Image (cartoon, rainbow, N blue to C red):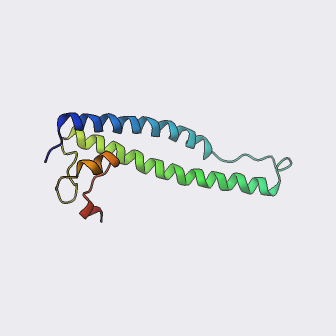
Amino acid sequence: MPLPPDMLEELRVDLERQLERLERSMSVTEEAVRPVQLDQQAVGRLSRMDSLQNQQMSRNLQEREQARYAALQAALERIREDVYGTCTRCGDGIEVGRLIVMPEVEHCPACAG
């Protein structure tokens, strides 16, 4: 069952808003994953370890952000192709409630299982 045009527009606007917020977050994360420059004289061993650990956590965040960014972009592409709200595996409709909670979702619950 196709989504009503007003609901589809609401979801498209929400996807674009989420994409903008994610882009801002990704720029901050990009700064955090830059190589750690440490003054070996001024920084103790634990501080260096903390810096490296923080950098690794930022890399993990960056990977999650990139995956979410791709999912949001793909959802917007499905809207443009007029197939948004349809499971990309089985072709069944995805419930509106599921799309409201996770507008980037591409599978129905059975296929996501």
**Image x and y of residue 93, in percent:** 18, 52
Residue at 23% from the left image edge and 37% from the top image edge: 7
Left or right of 18 in this view: 32: right
Of 65 and 30, nearer the camera is 65
Residue furthest front as drawn? 97
Does residue 90 sit above or below 58 in this rendering?
Answer: below
Name the residue furthest right: 41
Which of 89 and 17 lies nearest the eye of the viewer? 17
| x, y percent for residue 12 | 29, 36
Q: Please identify the quarter of the rendering in which residue 57 is found.
A: bottom right
The quadrant of the image that shows the C terminus is: bottom left
In the image shown, does 35 or 44 lie closer to the viewer? 44
Residue depicted at x 31% and y 45%: 100
Q: Residue at x 51, y 40 (%)?
A: 25
Residue 61, image x, y percentages: 53, 51
* In the image, residue 111 above or below residue 71: below
Q: Give left or right: position of 82 versus 56.
A: left
- Which residue occupies 47% across, 52% down? 64
